[in-house]
Amino acid sequence: MPAADSRSAPDPMSLRLPNTTAGKQWLAQFDAADQKTAIRLLSALTLVSHSLFERELQALILAEAAKVDGPVGLYATREIEPDADYFEAMANPNDPLAALGAVGSGADLGSEARIAATIRNLCKTAPDKLLNHPSLETLRVKRARAIVTIDDIIGSGKRTADFIQAMWRSSSVTSWHSRHQIGFLALAYSATPTGLARVRSLRSRPTIRIVRDCPTFAELPWHINIANELATLCRRYGRRTSRPGMALGFRKTMAALVFEHGCPNNTPSILWAPPADEGGWRPLFADRTVLPDEASAFPPDIMARDPVALLTDLAGHGEPTLPPAIQGPSPLGAAATTVLALVASGVRSRSALSFATGYNLRECTELLDRCTARGYLTATLRLTPAGRAELKEAGQVPEPRRLPARGEDDYYPTQLRGSS
């Protein structure tokens, strides 16, 4: 276990967005009694900068492409018409997709254009291995072994599922797939459990890989009373937007992640929905766009959360029980100590632990593996006597209690997995 953690304290970073000019103007729309909850909502958002998004997504693409024995076709996921055949549209010179390549006409170009540019740059480095939005004929000639769709977030799963289905409608693709000559791989920077389940259910059986779990307000490590206050706030003020039916985000996802290139519509509508009329609700990210003032709050890397604040939120409005190791330097490092303290309080969702530590999926899994290997956690993420001892005083470690449902986000230590 590392003796120290490389991440710095996050407190000032978590308050940057509420303290921007745009953030203050947005907060001023709330009644005085609701402003504390609104500030909590902004401070809980995971903000992903341009540089972090591109760096980590590129690393994911290259790592997954290297596992495929042969060329791979890379495609930026885009909105597509129902029942469309993607490759048939590409072959049609009158179709906007054929002329524009990755990006369709009328599309929200925030994520799509950025991902298309990332693909184009990567393909220049290895043109025989990485194919930039190849046609059906190119896939055949190059003997591509995988069709790789790439998105920023798999929220509800609809966009990724529809896009893969549009490719699946090609009889050639289904034939190659049935003969195990080509497979589907869906990559995204982040994803919700709902989105993952929807994409996994497709007949094409895509393999899904992400950089980090998408935090949702329902899954964050805080008391149920706080979660209810946030949901109530979003519903009440969401009625003042032009998207009252999306007060909790598209399909009630209530995502808590915003990219510098755009705010997903899976987040509460008070963050992004246009006004219903003149003088109506003014969103922080107008039309899902992040302007320079708000962009100044985006950190170059995801920062860890303050463990004392996390345990305070878990206690709700009562006094939190803080293990001594949380209140001073720990030989385990801040991230490991925070994880043990949260697990001791009943938090076992991987997305909640990633949110707390600031770690991506790989880093969080490695941290949990180390805690398990050292005997601090069981394979089902429960604190062991050794883990309690590491928190310095077992009598002050809170007993696990029932917390609000946070999804079935199972964790399997790598040392208990078969080889892959």
Image: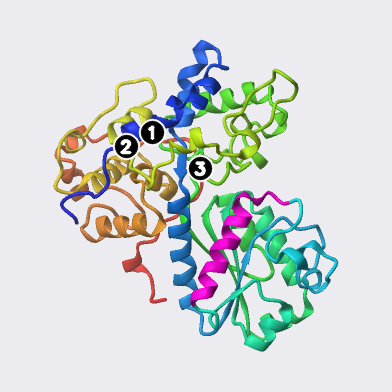
Give the amino acid type for the residue marked by disc 3 in the picture. Leu
Query: In terms of secondary structure, where does tag 1 sit?
Result: helix
Are there few (<14), some (14-19), or many (20+) residues within 10 Å of tag 1?
many
List x then y, in percent, for residue 281: 65, 22
Magenta highlight range:
107-125
Seen at 35% across and 43% down, the residue is: 303
In magenta segment, residue 78 = no
Q: Earlier in the sequence, mark 1 or mark 3?
A: 1
Tag 2: amino acid: Pro
Quarter the N terminus occupies: bottom left
Badges 2 and 1: C-beta atoms under 8 Å apart?
yes
**Residue 116 sits inside the magenta stretch:** yes
Relative depth, front residue between 328 and 81: 81
Task: Please give the residue where the numbered disc 1 appears in the rendered image.
Answer: 14
Side of 287 relative to 80 (left or right): left
Q: How many marks?
A: 3
Residues marked 1 and 3 touching at CB (< 8 Å): no
Q: Residue at x 72, y 51 (%)?
A: 107
Which residue corresponds to the image point at 75% horizontal and 81% vertical from the top-left?
172
Image quadrant where residue 417 sits: bottom left
307 or 72, nearer to the observer: 72
- Residue tagged by mark 3? 257
Residue 275 vs residue 10: left or right?
right
Looking at the picture, how far across and down is residue 131, in whole percent?
A: 59, 76
Instruction: From the image, tell me which residue sits under label 2.
Output: 10
In the structure shown, which secondary structural element does the residue marked by tag 3 occupy?
strand
